[in-house]
Each structure stands twice: as structure tokens, then as C-alpha cells.
Image: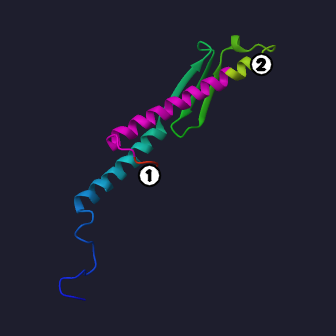
Amino acid sequence: MAKGGYRGGMPTGGMNMNMIKQAQKMQQDMLKMQQEMEEKEYTATSGGGMVTAVVSGKRTVTSISIEPDAVDPDDIEMLEDLVVAAVNAALAAAEEDSAKSMSKLTGGLNLGGMF
């Protein structure tokens, strides 16, 4: 190879150490944020509080509470709709919180599914 040519390692035009450290810190911060998010719970109600759903940060339903007045044997469909609405609202709250936390962490960068 000619004198002064490429000798392995990182080319001088590549990422510098500062960028690598920043990326590593962001990755550590994301892992920490994910752990914190998984420990949170999100609660939502429907039907004026007749049905309450609680979901975890892992997006799993952890509990459903139904007020006795919401139970009408002649209108099961309404109760089903209330349960679905409460669960969907709780999941939406979890998703919104996750998106806000991610936006804070990435400084608004759109990483396009990178993380």
C-alpha cells in the first residue's frame, strides 16, 4: 500500500468518539425509559365511570372494574362497548405517554422505528 494510505481502523471522515458516546448514552437512556414505562399503569374510564380499565406500560390489561349499574342483562352489547372503550382509552394513554417520553429523549428527532 502506498505511503499514507488507509491502514485500517476508522476512516478520518467517520463518526468521531463524541458521536459514539452520545449514541451510547441515548441507548442507555432509552433502556432506562423503557423500564420506567413498563412499571407504570394507565387508567381510563367509560360510561361516566361505569367501567374502569387499567393497563400496564407493557400494554397488557391488568384489571377491569364494572359498576353494578352497568350490568343490564338485556343490553350486553352496551357493556361490551364500554369495556372496549375503557381499554382502548387506557392503551391510548400509555401510547401517548410513551411517545412523549421518547420525544423528550430524542430531542424530537424522527428515528423512524430505529428504537
The total of numbered circles placed on residues is 2
In the current view of this chain or complex, which residue is farthest to the left? 4
Question: 83 above or below 13?
Answer: above
* Element class at badge 2: helix
Residue 24, position in %: x, y?
32, 56
**Which residues are drawn in magenta?**
82-110
Identify residue for label 1: 114
Residue at the (27%, 75%) spot, across then down: 9
The front one of 78 and 4 is 4
Residue 21, position in %: x, y?
27, 57
Residue 50, position in %: x, y?
63, 15
Identify residue for label 2: 76
Q: What's the coloring here?
A: rainbow
Q: Is residue 87 left or right of residue 42?
A: right
Q: Is residue 19 left or right of residue 76?
A: left
> The N terminus is located in which quarter?
bottom left
Q: Is residue 72 magenta?
A: no
Identified by mark 1, the residue type is Met
Which quadrant of the structure image shows residue 61? top right
In the current view of this chain or complex, which residue is farthest to the right? 74
In the current view of this chain or complex, which residue is farthest to the front? 2
Magenta stretch: dominant secondary structure: helix
Residue at the (28%, 54%) spot, across then down: 22
Residue 33, position in %: x, y?
40, 43
Crowding at mark 1 (Cα within 10 Å: few <14, some 14-19, many 20+)? few
Q: Which mark is residue 100?
A: none
Identified by mark 2, the residue type is Ile
